[in-house]
Image (tube, rainbow, N blue to C red):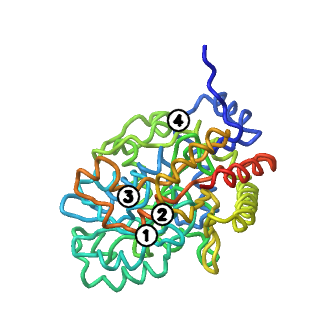
């Protein structure tokens, strides 16, 4: 049998706390592995970390974003502004709701959505803007919020919730950015809602999972929104399985045709084991970023990413290295050489208009020149907790030797 070659440096193995087996055993021994007390504990820990009004854990960031769009009332005839440079989930949730994704170009310096493009694209049909903290770098939230406030006279609400807010909803696809800061505060504090991912490659993982962090204005009750979303994530059922299992508590109702996207305790406990070490994880990831940048700043042909500014601090999730030679053929040839040397790298992301579904829907890369330029020149380097100095040195030297 032919053996599969194992890379010398993997791209992003999951960080699993050394006590995870004991934690998992505790859940298994309890006899309760689906949504219960451990999921609630993770929600409270995330509320403390992000200073969100309430947090609901779900089975993916994708599900979380769609639940919020449906709560907001997004549907056919509506538009949602998103960056063209993002993973397909950001757009797919809009399509699932029957609305139209309106794609905006990005800023070349940090891969985040251009506020000027948001301002240009807002119409009376715009119901939400989904920003993306790509690689963990926060968007320009104060500027974006100001644009949405100024555009309020053009906002055309479809329901009581939209009328109460009186402007376009700001939702962050914060899949990469747990721990990011904007003006020394968690980014959640500058959005109406932020949705995190705990997929296996994320800084904090539950294997699969996500969380909705609520920060709606005070005219909205975070508890009421939480209860609606909690029910909506369980088929619209008025009681979860844990509550129904209590003595003489079987009776329930279904008030919405909801979805099935709750997070079970067996996954939540993985997140709980990791969240207590999260500051340590961020510190180590930051050090890897700094080591990479110190090296590549001295190597001709590379542009290190911006991951900290006066107002922004990344979660150090993705190291988005760029080549000064932005020809895609050059980048792809380099990736082949890097892979052959045993280093796993990636590209984040293939812009949405290049994907068959969205291209066939009429989106064209010529409308997003900055996104195209960034894509054709970008290589994502491995960053993970436990990465050794020899592994980092190998990555840097292999990249240096692969330059064309």
Mark 4 or mark 1, which is nearer to you?
Answer: 1
User: Do the numbered discs 4 and 2 sit on residues whose CB atoms are within 8 Å?
Assistant: no
Residue at 52% over, 53% down: 331
Q: Where is residue 138, by image quadrant?
A: bottom right
Question: Which residue, given by chain and number where applicable, does mark 2 sit on?
Answer: 374
Question: Tag 4's secondary structure?
Answer: loop
Going from N to C along the chain, the mark reached first, 3 or 4, is 4
Question: Which residue, given by chain and number where applicable, does mark 4 sit on?
Answer: 34
Mark 3 or mark 2, which is nearer to you?
Answer: 2
The picture places residue 308, in percent across and down from the top left corner, at 65, 72
Going from N to C along the chain, the mark reached first, 4 or 1, is 4
Callout count: 4
Q: Is residue 19 left or right of residue 219?
A: right
The picture places residue 215, in percent across and down from the top left corner, at 48, 69
Mark 4 or mark 2, which is nearer to you?
Answer: 2
Question: Which residue, given by chain and number where applicable, does mark 3 sit on?
Answer: 68
User: Do the numbered discs 1 and 3 sit on residues whose CB atoms are within 8 Å?
Assistant: no
Residue 330's place in the image compared with 342, above or below, is below
Q: Residue furthest top?
A: 1
Work out whether residue 254 can be spotted.
yes
Going from N to C along the chain, the mark reached first, 4 or 2, is 4
Going from N to C along the chain, the mark reached first, 3 or 2, is 3
Marks 3 and 2 sit apart, C-alpha to C-alpha, by 30 Å
Marks 4 and 2 sit apart, C-alpha to C-alpha, by 42 Å
User: Do the numbered discs 2 and 1 sit on residues whose CB atoms are within 8 Å?
Assistant: yes
Question: Which residue, given by chain and number where applicable, does mark 1 sit on?
Answer: 106
Marks 1 and 3 sit apart, C-alpha to C-alpha, by 24 Å
Q: Looking at the picture, tell me which residue is in the foreground, 105 or 47.
A: 105
Q: Is residue 109 left or right of residue 122?
A: right
């Amino acid at each position: 049998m032919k053996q599969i070659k194992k890379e010398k440096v993997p791209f992003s193995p999951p960080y699993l706390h050394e006590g995870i087996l004991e934690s998992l055993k505790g859940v298994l021994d309890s006899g309760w592995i689906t949504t219960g007390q451990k999921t609630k504990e993770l929600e409270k820990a995330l509320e403390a970390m992000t200073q969100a009004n309430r947090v609901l854990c779900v089975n993916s960031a994708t599900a979380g974003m769609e639940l919020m769009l449906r709560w907001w009332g997004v549907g056919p005839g509506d538009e949602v502004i998103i960056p063209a440079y993002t993973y397909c989930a950001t757009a797919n949730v809009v399509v699932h709701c029957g609305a139209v994704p309106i794609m905006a170009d990005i800023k070349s310096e940090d891969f985040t959505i251009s506020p000027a493009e948001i301002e240009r694209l807002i119409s009376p049909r715009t119901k939400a803007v989904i920003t993306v903290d790509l690689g963990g770098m926060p968007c320009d939230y104060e500027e974006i919020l100001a644009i949405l406030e100024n555009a309020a006279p053009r906002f055309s609400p479809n329901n009581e919730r939209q009328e109460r807010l009186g402007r376009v909803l700001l939702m962050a696809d914060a899949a990469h950015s747990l721990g990011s800061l904007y003006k020394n505060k968690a980014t959640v504090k500058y959005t109406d809602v932020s949705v995190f991912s705990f997929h296996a490659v994320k800084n904090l993982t539950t294997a699969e999972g996500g969380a909705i962090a609520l920060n709606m204005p005070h005219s909205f009750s975070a508890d009421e929104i939480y209860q609606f979303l909690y029910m909506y994530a369980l088929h619209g059922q008025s009681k979860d399985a844990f509550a129904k299992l209590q003595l003489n508590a079987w009776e329930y109702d279904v008030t919405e045709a909801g979805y099935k996207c709750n997070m079970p305790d067996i996954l939540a406990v993985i997140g709980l084991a990791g969240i207590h070490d999260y500051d340590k994880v961020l510190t180590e990831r930051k050090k890897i970023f700094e080591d990479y940048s110190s090296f590549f700043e001295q190597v001709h042909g590379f542009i290190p990413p911006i991951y900290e500014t006066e107002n922004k601090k990344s979660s150090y999730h993705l190291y988005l290295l760029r080549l000064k030679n932005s020809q895609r053929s050059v980048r792809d040839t380099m990736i082949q050489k890097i892979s052959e040397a045993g280093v796993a790298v990636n590209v984040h992301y293939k812009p949405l208009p290049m994907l068959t579904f969205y291209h066939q829907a009429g989106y064209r890369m010529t409308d997003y020149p900055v996104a195209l330029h960034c894509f054709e020149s970008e290589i994502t380097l491995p960053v993970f907790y436990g990465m050794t100095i020899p592994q980092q040195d190998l990555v840097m030297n292999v990249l240096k030797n692969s330059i064309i």
